[in-house]
Image (cartoon, grey):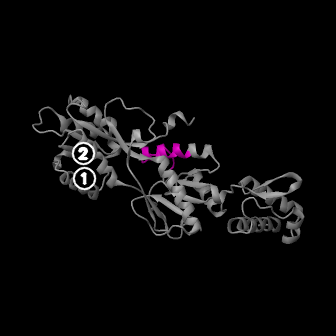
């Protein structure tokens, strides 16, 4: 690296450090160009390039003859990076949860002044936006990182782990150095069974995706505690990647030749919803008469329901807002790195925001 370039990098890093750690707080005036030239023993051109870069990054803005000032919302206090493990929504592993979360992030980013850029390919480090993420982290252009799922792929020496930036992730429990945004499965189970009980249903079946044995045991214990019934063969496990199996599973559970059928059905993975509903239609089962159905949902949903079922899931605006609040708390020392914030399950009608399809171009 040539000397002028090296000097430019040095000045840039020092001024960013002063804005991130003080003494240049938001709204503060920077020294004049002449003062910076003398202080860093740098040329006018080098200082101008540094200020141009800081302006482009959103750290400072110029007010003509009044001078250069730190932005009121510099990136290290207002940009929350949303990190996805895979390349993009063309990846076979891309989930509907991530799709809605991405759309919610677009809304938040457009609304400002807080921004939510998102990045792909963090698991395999094979997407251009991953390299942009690393650059943004190294250049203090992010207030913190929100991982869309538990980043078990990160190694201890990863820049995403070693950089002094708060980290949170959508996962059940914290990882070392990463706080948890936990989707509250207990409230999900409780509210689903509350609904079935209110509808007078007592024989409960389940179509599940990649849910753990612990989740299934919680389901069975909650059903038993309410005096309701279930049977092990009323739990059908279907891979979300092969959702067509949910059609056969629902058809089998509600087929009229079955001598004992569930009268309440929880379809607990939104990748399976359409297939399972088609299976109920194949069986001739009428929702609201033969049984009541609770479908999993991630809100705000883009599509209306065409059947009298209920959607139960998580408000992803709340996930994003809680993630940003937790990052702010971590930065301010009001929360520990092993913190957990639980996101309660809600029915779709309890959310107050309109569908994202009407909000994002």
Counting from the top left corner in percent of width and height, residue 281 is at 25, 29
Q: Are marks 1 and 2 in contact (CB under 8 Å)?
A: yes
How packed is label 2: few (under 14 Cα within 10 Å), some, or many (20 or more)? Answer: many
Q: For this view, does 184 lie left or right of residue 199? A: right
Quadrant that contains the C terminus? top right
Residue to which mark 2 is pinned:
206
Q: Is residue 211 visible?
A: yes
Q: For this view, does 321 lie left or right of residue 284? A: right
Query: Disc 1 or 2, which lies upstream in sequence?
Result: 2
Residue to which mark 1 is pinned:
219
Residue in the image at 61% along x and 50% along y: 115
Q: Which segment did they paint magenta?
A: 87-105
Residue in the image at 23% along x and 57% along y: 217
Q: Is residue 127 found inside the magenta-colored segment of the image? A: no
Q: Is residue 100 found inside the magenta-colored segment of the image? A: yes
Residue 92, located in which quarter of the rendered image? top left
Quadrant that contains the N terminus? bottom right
**Please, is residue 179 above or below residue 71 in the view?**
below
Q: Give the CA separation, mark 1 to mark 2.
A: 9 Å
Counting from the top left corner in percent of width and height, residue 124 is at 50, 57
How packed is label 1: few (under 14 Cα within 10 Å), some, or many (20 or more)? Answer: many
Counting from the top left corner in percent of width and height, residue 221 is at 21, 56
Counting from the top left corner in percent of width and height, residue 308 is at 31, 31
Foreground mark, 1 or 2, reads 1
Q: Secondary structure at mark 2?
A: strand
Q: For this view, does 161 lie left or right of residue 282? A: right
């Amino acid at each position: 690296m040539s000397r002028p370039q090296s000097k430019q990098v040095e000045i840039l890093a020092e001024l960013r450090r002063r804005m991130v750690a003080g003494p240049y707080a938001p709204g503060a005036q920077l020294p004049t160009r002449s003062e910076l030239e003398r202080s860093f023993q740098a040329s006018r051109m080098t200082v101008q390039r540094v200020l141009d870069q800081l302006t482009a990054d959103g750290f400072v803005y110029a007010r003509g003859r009044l001078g250069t000032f730190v932005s009121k919302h510099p990136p290290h206090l207002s940009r929350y990076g949303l990190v996805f493990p895979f390349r993009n929504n063309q990846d076979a592993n891309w989930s509907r949860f991530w799709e809605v979360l991405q759309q919610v992030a677009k809304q938040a980013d457009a609304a400002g002044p807080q921004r939510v850029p998102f990045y792909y390919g963090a698991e395999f480090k094979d997407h251009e936006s991953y390299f942009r993420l690393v650059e943004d982290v190294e250049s203090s252009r992010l207030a913190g990182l929100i991982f869309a799922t538990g980043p078990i792929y990160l190694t201890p020496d990863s820049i995403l782990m070693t950089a002094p930036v708060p980290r949170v992730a959508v996962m059940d429990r914290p990882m070392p150095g990463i706080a948890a945004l936990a989707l509250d499965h207990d409230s999900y189970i409780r509210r689903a069974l509350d609904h079935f009980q209110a509808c007078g249903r007592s024989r409960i079946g389940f179509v599940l995706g990649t849910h753990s044995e612990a989740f299934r045991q919680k389901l069975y214990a909650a059903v038993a505690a309410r005096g309701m019934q279930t049977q092990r063969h009323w739990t059908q496990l279907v891979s979300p990647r092969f959702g067509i199996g949910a059609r056969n599973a629902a058809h089998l559970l509600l087929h009229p030749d079955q001598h004992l059928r569930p009268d309440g059905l929880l379809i607990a993975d939104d990748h399976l919803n359409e297939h399972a509903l088609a299976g109920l239609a194949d069986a001739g089962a009428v929702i609201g008469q033969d049984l009541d159905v609770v479908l999993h949902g991630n809100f705000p949903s883009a599509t209306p329901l065409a059947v009298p079922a209920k959607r139960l899931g998580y408000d992803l605006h709340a996930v994003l807002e809680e993630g940003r609040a937790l990052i702010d708390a971590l930065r301010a020392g009001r929360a520990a790195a092993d913190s957990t914030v639980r996101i309660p399950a809600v029915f779709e009608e309890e959310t107050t925001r309109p569908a994202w399809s009407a909000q994002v171009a």
